[in-house]
Image (cartoon, rainbow, N blue to C red):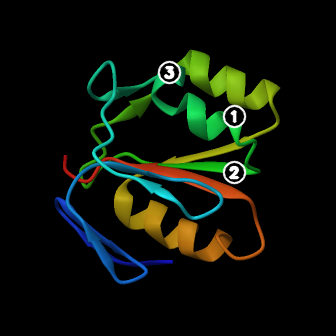
Amino acid sequence: MIDSHSFGKMIIDGRQFRSDLIIFPNHQIAENWHRHAGHLLIYEDISDLVAEGPEYILVGTGVGGMMRVDRELEGLLQELKINLISARNAKAVKKYNELHQGHQIGACFHLTC
């Protein structure tokens, strides 16, 4: 469960994170996550997460929503029958907390802009 978030910071199950991150369906967290194309999320950025075959992938696009999802990635996830939810962090955190119990969910969060 995500306890709280603010610009540049997220607390998950009592642990504090200060860099972009990926949360896998088994609740493991990959810290210091970097994207190949900055504010554009492409398949290569989350291929390990996609390989886990979650029911949902939730994308926290930042506090101001600066990160966007590549259309090719959207299409691939649709083909794989993985539900994509992309939203600014406040809404994404709320949705993650609603879904994380009882669903196979993975997430990635851009913690700043």
Measured along the vertical axis of the image, is residue 102 above or below residue 8? Answer: below
Going by the numbered disc 3, the residue's amino acid type is Glu
Q: CA distance from mark 3 to mark 1?
A: 11 Å
Q: Residue at x 69, y 34 (%)?
A: 51
Going by the numbered disc 1, the residue's amino acid type is Ala
Q: Residue tagged by mark 3?
A: 44
Q: Residue at x 51, y 77 (%)?
A: 1
Measured along the vertical axis of the image, is residue 75 above or below residue 64? Answer: above
Q: Is residue 6 left or right of residue 87?
A: left
Circle 3: is it few (<14), some (14-19), or many (20+) Cα within 10 Å? few
- Residue 71 visible in this rendered orientation of the protein: yes
Check residue 56 in the rendering and tell me which mark sits there, or answer none. 2
What x and y, as percent, mark residue 101? 70, 76
Circle 2: is it few (<14), some (14-19), or many (20+) Cα within 10 Å? many
What x and y, as percent, mark residue 95? 56, 67
Going by the numbered disc 2, the residue's amino acid type is Tyr
Label 1 sits on a secondary structure element that is: helix
- Asked where in the image residue 99 lies, by quadrant, the reply is bottom right
- Residue 70 visible in this rendered orientation of the protein: no
Question: Considering depth in this image, is 9 or 90 the residue closer to the camera?
Answer: 9
Q: Residue tagged by mark 1?
A: 51
Label 2 sits on a secondary structure element that is: strand
Question: Considering depth in this image, is 38 or 30 the residue closer to the camera?
Answer: 30
